[in-house]
Image (cartoon, grey):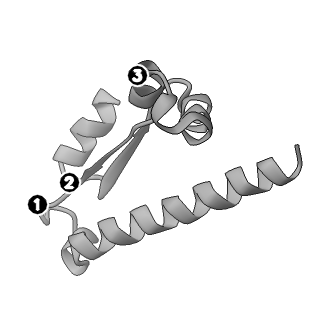
Amino acid sequence: MESGLKEARAGHLIGLLHFSHNFSKSFEERLDLGSEAQNGSVDASVLSVWMDMSCKSSVISQMDSSTDMSYLFTEFDSAVKSVFLYDRKNV
């Protein structure tokens, strides 16, 4: 992750996503148990996002960063719902 952050700071990446160890398992526990999920599962189910907001990258300079972040979260939400809902139908 450190090398990815270094590349993002240098303007070589437009963003970086970090999934914690056991992200999927912890995220599923959060979905299943809601507020009853253990703190460790909540912490491990966090998706960290770093975006280049400095316009160092020629790609990011052509985009509206807030719109891109909104799109990113909307797409992630859609993907999670489709994967976990599909999984639950086939159990």
Q: Is residue 73 left or right of 33 when viewed as pictured? A: left
Q: Which residue is mark 2?
A: 11
Query: Which residue is pictured at 31% across the width and 31% down the height?
Result: 3
- The reply, left or right, for residue 10 in relation to residue 50 is left
Taking depth in this image into account, of 15 and 21 the one nearest to the observer is 21
Which amino acid is tagged 2? Gly
Q: Nearer the viewer, mark 3 or mark 1?
A: 3
The residue pinned by badge 3 equals 39
* Quarter location, residue 62: bottom left
11 shown above or below 31: below
Q: Residues within 10 Å of mark 1 (few under 14, many from 20)?
A: few
Q: Nearer the viewer, residue 7 or 68?
A: 68
Which residue does the numbered mark 1 point to in the structure image?
54
Q: Residues within 10 Å of mark 3 (few under 14, many from 20)?
A: few
In this rendered view, identify the residue nearer to me: 38 or 1: 38
Count of number-bearing discs: 3
Most extreme residue toward the right is: 90
Query: Spatial distance from mark 2 to mark 1, Cα to Cα?
Result: 8 Å
Look at 59% across and 32% down and name the residue there: 29
Residue 37 placement (x, y as % from top left): 50, 28
Q: Which numbered disc covers residue 30? A: none
The kind of secondary structure element at disc 2 is loop
Left or right of 39? Residue 63 is left
Q: Give coordinates of residue 70: x percent, y percent.
A: 33, 69
Query: Where residue 65 sits in the image (x, y, percent)?
Result: 23, 70
Instruction: Classify 10 Å Cα crowding around label 2: few (below 14), some (14-19), many (20 and above).
Output: some
Work out whether mark 2 precedes mark 3 in sequence or the reverse, and give the earlier one. 2
Specify which label sits upstream in the sequence, 3 or 1: 3
Whole-percent x and y of residue 53? 15, 61
The quarter of the rendered structure image containing the N terminus is top left
Residue at image location 69% in from the left, 50% down from the top: 84
